[in-house]
Image: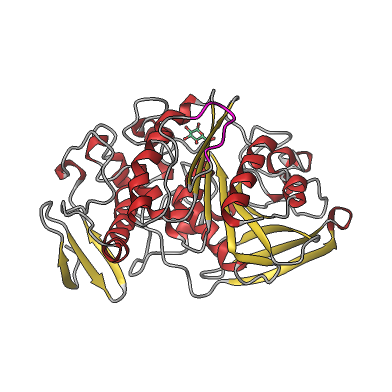
Amino acid sequence: MHGGTLLTALGSVGCFLVLFGTTALADFPEPAKLPSNPELPDPLVMLNGERVKTKEDWVTKRRPELKELFQHYMYGHMPDAPGNVTFKTERTDKKYLDGKATKKEVTIAFGPPDTPKLHLLLVIPNDRKKPAPVFVGANFHGNYTVTKDPTIPLPTVWVPNGTKDIKDNRAAEAARGFQAAVWDIEDVLSRGYAVATFYCGDVDPDRADKREGVQAHVLNKGETKPGPNDWGSVAAWAWGIMRTVDYLVTDADLDKDRMIVVGHSRLGKAALVAGAFDERIAVVIPHQAGCGGTAPSRGKVGESVKRINTSFPHWFDANFKEFNDQVDRLPFDQNGLVALVAPRPVLFTNGVEDTWANPEGQFQVLQAADPVYRFLGVEGLEAKKMPEPGKLIDSRVGYHIRLGKHSMGKDDWKVWMDFADKHLGK
Ligand code: GCU
């Protein structure tokens, strides 16, 4: 048990929730002591076996419990928003892209002075009468790769090798704009949306061998150094998205009620975590996020929990590794994370050839989250079976699969914008 005042005993599995001031810390059972459940656990049943009966129970008991469970057993504990987040607009160009847009580059700083800073690239359409809805998401290689703009500085932190001239994990001029088709900014602007993106490595370079991201600097309450069940990289990237949202809600050019989080693959996992934990985000679109994101941990197709924990040990916390050979003991599955998004719209998008991300299992995750949407009095997943490729299920719990492989581009953006138009209005 952690010290402090014991407020609630959660019963059958011997679990206690203890509050320190305002922070709830859960002392949950060891993984091996959790009951085995081969099915996706019902998000409307509490850890102690009690069924959620009212919306109030959902909001005041089960939602907080699920957030604790996901942090404790999988993603690691994320610190609260730091009180000292600051924003500095480094460059503004009101005549960007031949006058079609306004570009802003904003530095987001937090924590002690040596904490890594987040560099946000924001492109906002000029042809509009109201504040713009905005897509927000992390990118894989640096802001300078998402457009050909020569003024965007190269990241100075570690970047992945293997593309263009990038060697020794240092960003290279030759890579400028090489992700422009992935981000498709001009099309997105032409449909009235703004785009906000930052390099994921600003908050956490994706390295298994070294913790050099925000986790090393921003600690959970009461700690002097990071613990084994503190946030891994997926949670750190999600936390970075939330700090970006801290800025976005202050920008009068943007509609703070129409923010959509997107992300591809590992960054799709982060998009879903951010959407689940941050209710300021209106629509959540993880793309091909797969295991550890949108695919069931209990899935039998594609990447397994054991495999992801072995290849990418830094993405999750120490507890998650305990489930490598006993995923049936996880007290939740990814439908519980979607349930945390409810009643807000969510869309999973996939590619037929991307079986590593288990597109069918993802559909089952949505089916198993649907009851929570219904319970909260809104529409859920309006499809009984997987749609054929190219047909968008655009209900509040949405799904799409297209032909093709693991990638992100124009065709995906079109689907995301159709979904956002439907749920947020044009
Ligand atoms: C690997 C990993 C996936 C991840 C993907 C990506 O394939 O196994 O879990 O989603 O990389 O981020 O591209």
**Vertical relation: 17 (above or below) 232:** below
Asked where in the image residue 256 lies, by quadrant, the reply is: bottom right
The image shows residue 174 at horizontal and vertical percentages of: 78, 39
**Vertical relation: 337 (above or below) 281:** above
The reply, left or right, for residue 207 in relation to residue 141 is left
Q: Does 70 appear in magenta?
A: no
Please state, as top left, top right, bottom left or bottom right, where the C terminus lies in the image: bottom right
Q: Residue furthest right?
A: 98
Q: Residue furthest top?
A: 353
Q: Nearer the viewer, residue 159 or 339?
A: 339
Q: Does 389 appear in magenta?
A: yes
The image shows residue 250 at horizontal and vertical percentages of: 62, 72
The reply, left or right, for residue 264 in relation to residue 294 is right
Q: Nearer the viewer, residue 253 or 19?
A: 253
The reply, left or right, for residue 17 in relation to residue 313 is left
Q: Is residue 60 visible?
A: yes
* Residue at x 61% of width, y 32% of height: 407
* Residue at x 26% of width, y 73% of height: 20
Q: Is residue 228 visible?
A: no
Asked where in the image residue 102 lies, by quadrant, the reply is: bottom right
In this picture, which residue range is highlighted in magenta? 387-393
The reply, left or right, for residue 374 in relation to residue 216 is left
Q: Nearer the viewer, residue 144 or 103?
A: 103
Secondary structure mainly formed by the magenta segment: loop
The image shows residue 404 at horizontal and vertical percentages of: 60, 25
**Vertical relation: 272 (above or below) 405:** below
The image shows residue 359 at horizontal and vertical percentages of: 46, 30
